[in-house]
Every structure is written in structure tokens, then in C-alpha cells.
Amino acid sequence: MKNIFVIIIMLFLGMGTVFSQSNFKSVTASYSPIEALGFEEGIKRGDPSDVIKVGSLYYVWYWKVGDHVRWATWYATSPDGFVWTEKGEVLPPGKDGSWDDEGCFTPGILVANNKYYLFYSGANNPYRTKDLEKSKTRIGIAVSDSPDGPWVKLPTNPIMVPSDNVTEFDSHRIDDASIIVRDGKYWLYYKGRQWGGKSPRETKMGVAIADNPEGPYVKYENNPVVKGGHEVLVWPQGKGVATLIGKEGPEDVRKSIMYAEDGFNFKKTHDFTNKNVPLAPGAYRPEAFTDNGNGKLIEWGRAESY
């Protein structure tokens, strides 16, 4: 897997913070290779988090696994978004028998209260099995005073788990957190897959809300909020919330940008002109945690290459 730099170009009329179905538009992503974090024999990296800037450096987190490398969350820094330096492992798998002893992956980042909160998905060993119970995924949080760590996993982990009701969209797997601050609360968007061996194409997106960064997170009663999308990327857009939907999902959902003024009822506002839409993207979202109602279009981020 090779990482790439993605530039998102929105084609629209009017103010950049206005999204509406009555003014339906298109969106184009252009791609450029980045330096470092490219191909490495026997190693895989994937699912970059959203990007934050601290001082003069950009930070991104992602999973890494391979020959003699356990499935863990790592991070890298960059002065410009193009040239990256891998810094090291930050979240290793848990102890044998724990809920995350197989791996820690699909990280998401939140900055709040002068602390850094690294959300991650965890799975217990053996994860790759036909046994649905053993292949469940859950979400946990690690906290640090610095983006460079050290990180401490919360004793209350996992903070989100699959539903006990097998008819719910997230009764088998729940992972891939993307977090924003909205109306003074913490909105955690995530993907879920229903019990019964559903495929990645049947993944849907939900949201859970908390008064504090560490939770408890309460799932929205009318989840799912998007009936498609295998990766989760959301950002504040004006007074609402926008999300990028990749290649998975129903025809009327996939390969699009969707928008919800209330954060719940998403409608498509943009179609991608690209055949290859951003794959497992993480964006630079400077307004993600400001809660100022002035969120703007994302302009760039990191993604996997096809």
C-alpha cells in the first residue's frame, strides 16, 4: 500500500460554506505521491487518521503491520504534508486475552482540554475467523498531553461496542471513529456492520454523542445516519456536517459528498467526477474542534492508493 497526497477541488456556486441539494455540484480529487511511508517489502500501512497541525508540524496516525511488526497504530510528522517522517509505534495491541490483543487500527484524533485523544479500533485474537463473536470490533481511546505521546489507554475501554440487538446495523462490527466538536459536545461518527456476515459493501455510518471527550458516548436513536460508506470522514461545514463517501454503498450514496445541517439527516450534495475516489482518506480539518459554526471545505489530506 502506497500513501498519497489528496487535493479536493469543489465545484460549486455561492459561498464555500453553503451545501444544498437544490444547488447540486460535482467534486474532483487530484492525487500526488508523498515522500516516505511508501512501499516497503513485507510491510503494510493503512487507514490514515485525520491530520492535525501542532506548531510547525502536521501529524497523522495509521495502522502498520507486517513481517516482525505487530498490528499497531503508528504515527508520522511532516512540515508540509508531502514529506513525512515515520516516528514510531504509539498504540500496541493489548495483553493476551484483552479486547484489543489482535491489533489497534483505524485511528481518529481529537484535541480538547489541552489534551490529545487518540480513538482506535481494536479486535481480539483470532480476528480473522468465521466465528462472528470472535471477529467483533470495538472502539477505545488513549490519552496524552502531547501528540508525540506517551499514550495511555483508558481503563474504561472499550468506550463503544457492537449492539446486542442483532437487527441493528452495528451489531457485529463498530470502528473507524471520526470526531468533531459541535454544540459544545463531542460527536463521534463511526461505521458499523450488522450481525450475520454482512460484506464491507453493506457497511453503514452512525453517530454517538458525549458531553466529555472520554465519554460516555450515546448512540443516536435513529442510526444509521448514512446507509453506505466503508470509511468515515466528517468535518464541520458551515453550521452543519459534511461527509465524504467512498466507493462502497448503494448507488445513490457512494462516490459523493453528503451534508446534514443537523448532523443527522445527510443528503447528497456533490458527486465525484473521479472514477477512483479517495480511498480510506484522512483530511486536514482545521475547524474540526473549534465549534465556531464556520467550518470550511476540506482542501487536502492523506489516502491510500489503488
Image: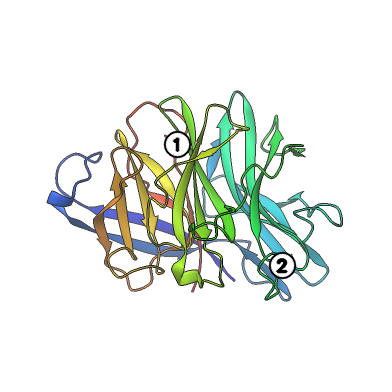
Mark closer to the chain start, 2 or 1? 2
Label 2 vs label 1: CA separation? Answer: 32 Å
Asked which quadrant contains residue 119, the reply is: top right
Residue found 27% across the figure and 67% down from its top: 273
The type of residue carrying mark 1 is Ala
Q: Which mark is residue 288?
A: 1
* Secondary element at tag 1: loop
Note whether 108 is above or below 197 in the view shown: above
Is residue 58 visible in the rendered structure shown here?
no
Q: How many marks?
A: 2
Q: Please report the residue visible at 78 percent of the width from the left and 55 percent of the height from the top.
A: 93
Tag 2: amino acid: Tyr
User: Along the line of sight, which residue is nearer the eye, 158 or 66?
Assistant: 158
Q: Is residue 156 left or right of residue 19?
A: right
Residue 127 got which mark?
Answer: 2
Please tell me whether mark 2 sits on a helix, a strand or a loop.
Answer: loop
